[in-house]
């Protein structure tokens, strides 16, 4: 049996952190644009109020948004990775994104609060990463 600690040490953590940073910059940009647009366009403000007012819609949208962020992270990883993408790298992307979110929340970079450290965001990020990263699952057998 292989040593999982050595496998974790060999992951390209710097690349994964860079991917998470680029992905979160996109997410911050989207939230900022929607925040500004909601102040000037009443239809967007009404839609955001509907999402905030209905708990079921709000949670569903939060999970879907987090899944989109996870899928975007895999797209960025495909562009930035220097080696073939493995399942371990996909799993390594999850804590990198969560670390970025944990840093962005106190800095108030996510004004609408769609990304967080709750179960909805965590589940959405994992679903998005592994939905978009499905072609790279075959490397799981080599773990």
Image: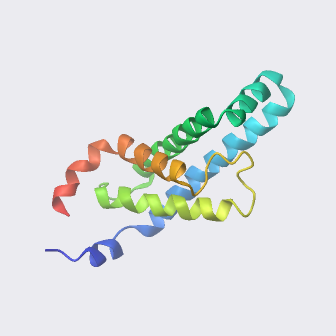
The residue depicted at 72 percent of the width and 26 percent of the height is: 47
| Front-lying residue, 6 or 61 | 61
The mark total stands at: 0
Task: State the colouring used for the structure image.
Answer: rainbow
Question: For this view, does 123 lie left or right of residue 105?
Answer: left
Q: Is any atom of residue 86 visible in this view?
A: no
| Front-lying residue, 131 or 75 | 131
Residue 60 in the image: state x and y as whole percent.
55, 36
The quarter holding residue 61 reads top right
Question: For this view, does 135 lie left or right of residue 123?
Answer: left
The quarter holding residue 93 reads bottom left
For the N terminus, the quadrant is bottom left
Residue 7 in the image: state x and y as whole percent.
28, 72
The residue depicted at 70 percent of the width and 51 percent of the height is: 110
Question: For this view, does 123 lie left or right of residue 31?
Answer: left
Q: Residue furthest left?
A: 1
The residue depicted at 22 percent of the width and 77 percent of the height is: 3
Judge whether 143 appears above or below 74 on screen.
below
| Front-lying residue, 55 or 64 | 55
The quarter holding residue 21 reads bottom right
Q: Residue furthest top?
A: 43
Judge whether 43 appears above or below 82 on screen.
above
Residue 117 in the image: state x and y as whole percent.
57, 58
Q: Is any atom of residue 42 visible in this view?
A: yes
For the C terminus, the quadrant is bottom left
The residue depicted at 37 percent of the width and 59 percent of the height is: 91
Residue 102 in the image: state x and y as whole percent.
61, 63
């Amino acid at each position: 049996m292989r040593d999982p600690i050595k496998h974790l040490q060999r992951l390209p953590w710097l690349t994964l952190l860079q991917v998470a940073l680029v992905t979160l910059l996109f997410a911050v940009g989207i939230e900022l644009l929607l925040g500004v647009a909601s102040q000037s366009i009443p239809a967007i403000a009404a839609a955001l109020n509907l999402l905030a007012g209905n708990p079921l819609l709000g949670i569903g949208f939060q999970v879907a948004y987090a899944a989109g962020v996870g899928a975007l992270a895999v797209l960025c990883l495909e562009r930035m990775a220097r080696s073939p993408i493995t399942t371990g790298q996909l799993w390594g992307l999850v804590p990198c994104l969560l670390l970025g979110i944990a840093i962005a929340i106190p800095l108030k970079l996510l004004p609408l609060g769609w990304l967080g450290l709750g179960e909805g965001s965590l589940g959405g990020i994992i679903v998005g990463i592994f939905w978009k990263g499905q072609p790279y699952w075959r490397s799981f057998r080599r773990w």
